[in-house]
């Protein structure tokens, strides 16, 4: 418990430092005219506007990566190893970080190019861009288990036929079709455990960490999976898209206003001037941070519903509580964060709240069973 509290205090400090650096970096470029310098350099390299946009974006990204790399290594590698969560060798960890950076970098660069191309074509660029981003999110969800997950994990079909049939039967009871159950080799990286249901339609599959299989009972595995199935049964993908789509519209709309403001404040040639990229990055970051309480609040709401679904579907609150306790120990979870921290940073309800909710359901079920048994006994006595 003390280790978990210390670990999360240090993680919070590093997170706040990272956010501070991420804000200070584009802000410094905006205040010093660095964006104009980068845009001038890009114009000397190429007369093609899309190349200029790409060069400025890549330079910004490289600068941010270099600035935040030490913090990322401490937060993502050294600290988890220090507290026994991570045992992945540094070369392998760096390889995973590089793959993730390439994926995020390519997607971010594509998004920037789309925005700056639309800026030239239509004053409603923000509306079209939002539609493109929403469509891209749906596509990424579909290809995640096929193209993305195998880049980081070796996936093998679950060999335990009995458990596989039990989990697929649970999925059918939940009304969620899955093409199979696969095991991810998390144990070669970390002791942490989890399960997921990823993909859409014919790409949807159940993925279990091998650490989950080795540390949890079949009942507890079923409880963890039932929670994940609850998201699909409730249509959380659709609900999430609705919320994210609305926030994307708001973000792009406000970004459009801020870009227009930047033309006056920063002396830009127009909203599509590549020199405005640091300003756009700063605006986007600020809007994202401002949305955190809303997005995390929505996430905690659907997570509570998924917990309730798991309890109702398995009818085994004891297994759910046992699974949460094991996850807390393996993942070094912070069981009771402050309410303010939970509101701003937690996408799931605090672990002790989840356990208390499940314990309440268990006591309610037990009371109901006892009352029913008493009524049956009374009727028997009368007879």
Image (cartoon, helix red, strand yellow):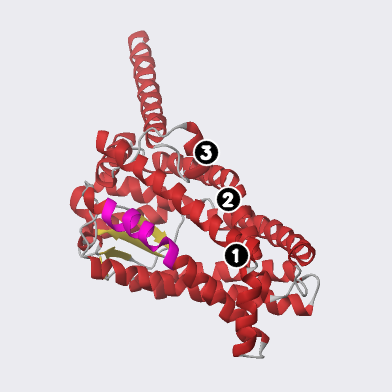
Q: Nearer the viewer, residue 327 or 31?
A: 31
How would you rate the neighbour count of disc 2 (Cα within 10 Å): few for under 14, some for 14-19, many for 20 or more? Answer: few
Name the disc covering residue 118, or none.
Answer: none
Residue at 34% of width from left, 66% of height from top?
Answer: 180
Residue at 34% of width from left, 47% of height from top?
Answer: 224
Does 77 appear in magenta?
A: yes
Residue at 28% of width from left, 64% of height from top?
Answer: 184
Q: Main secondary structure of the magenta part?
A: helix
Left or right: 78, with 59 as reference point: left
Name the disc covering residue 29, or none.
Answer: 1
- The residue that mark 2 highlights is 289
- Mark yes or no: residue 199 visible: no
In the rendered structure, which segment of residues is drawn in magenta?
Answer: 66-79
Does 329 appear in magenta?
A: no
- The residue that mark 3 highlights is 343
Percent position of residue 333, x then y? 32, 41
Quadrant where the C terminus is found in the figure: top left
Residue that protrudes farthest toward the top in the picture: 382
Distance from disc 2 to disc 1, alpha carbons, whole Å, reads 20 Å
In the picture shown, does residue 49 fall above or below 195?
below
Which type of secondary structure does the marked residue at label 1 adopt?
Answer: helix
Percent position of residue 211, x then y? 22, 55
- Mark yes or no: residue 329 visible: yes
In the picture shown, does residue 224 fall above or below 383?
below
Percent position of residue 354, x then y? 40, 35
Distance from disc 2 to disc 3, alpha carbons, whole Å, reads 12 Å
Q: Nearer the viewer, residue 359 or 108?
A: 108
């Amino acid at each position: 418990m003390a280790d978990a509290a210390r670990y999360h205090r240090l993680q919070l400090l590093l997170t706040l430092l990272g956010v501070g650096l991420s804000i200070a970096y584009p802000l410094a470029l905006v205040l010093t005219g660095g964006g104009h310098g980068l845009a001038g350099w890009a114009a000397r390299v190429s007369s093609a506007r899309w190349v200029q946009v790409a060069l400025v974006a890549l330079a910004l990204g490289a600068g941010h990566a270099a600035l935040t790399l030490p913090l990322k290594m401490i937060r993502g590698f050294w600290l988890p190893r220090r507290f026994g969560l991570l045992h992945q060798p540094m070369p392998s960890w760096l390889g995973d970080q590089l793959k993730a950076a390439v994926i995020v970098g390519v997607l971010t660069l594509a998004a920037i190019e789309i925005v700056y191309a639309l800026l030239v074509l239509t004053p409603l660029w923000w509306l079209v861009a939002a539609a493109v981003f929403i469509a891209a999110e749906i596509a990424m969800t579909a290809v995640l288990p096929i193209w993305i997950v195998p880049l980081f994990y070796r996936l093998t079909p679950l060999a335990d036929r009995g458990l596989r049939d039990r989990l697929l039967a649970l999925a059918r009871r939940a009304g969620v079709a899955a093409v199979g159950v696969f095991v991810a080799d998390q144990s070669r990286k970390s002791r942490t455990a989890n399960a997921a249901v990823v993909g859409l339609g014919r790409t949807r599959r159940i993925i279990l960490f091998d650490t989950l299989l080795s540390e949890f009972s079949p009942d507890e595995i079923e409880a963890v999976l039932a929670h994940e199935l609850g998201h699909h049964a409730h249509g959380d993908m659709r609900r999430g898209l609705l919320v994210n789509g609305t926030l994307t519209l708001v973000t792009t709309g406000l970004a459009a206003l801020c870009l227009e403001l930047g033309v006056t404040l920063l002396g830009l040639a127009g909203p599509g001037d590549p020199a405005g990229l640091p300003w756009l990055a700063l605006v986007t970051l600020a809007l994202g941070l401002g949305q955190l309480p809303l997005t995390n609040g929505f996430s905690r709401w659907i997570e509570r519903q998924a917990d309730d679904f798991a309890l109702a579907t398995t009818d085994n609150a004891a297994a759910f509580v046992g699974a949460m306790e094991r996850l807390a120990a393996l993942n070094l979870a912070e069981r009771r964060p402050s309410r303010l921290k939970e509101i701003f940073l937690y996408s799931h309800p605090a672990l002790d709240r989840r356990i208390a909710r499940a314990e309440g359901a268990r006591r309610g079920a037990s009371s109901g069973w006892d009352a029913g048994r008493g009524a049956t006994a009374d009727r028997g006595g009368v007879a």
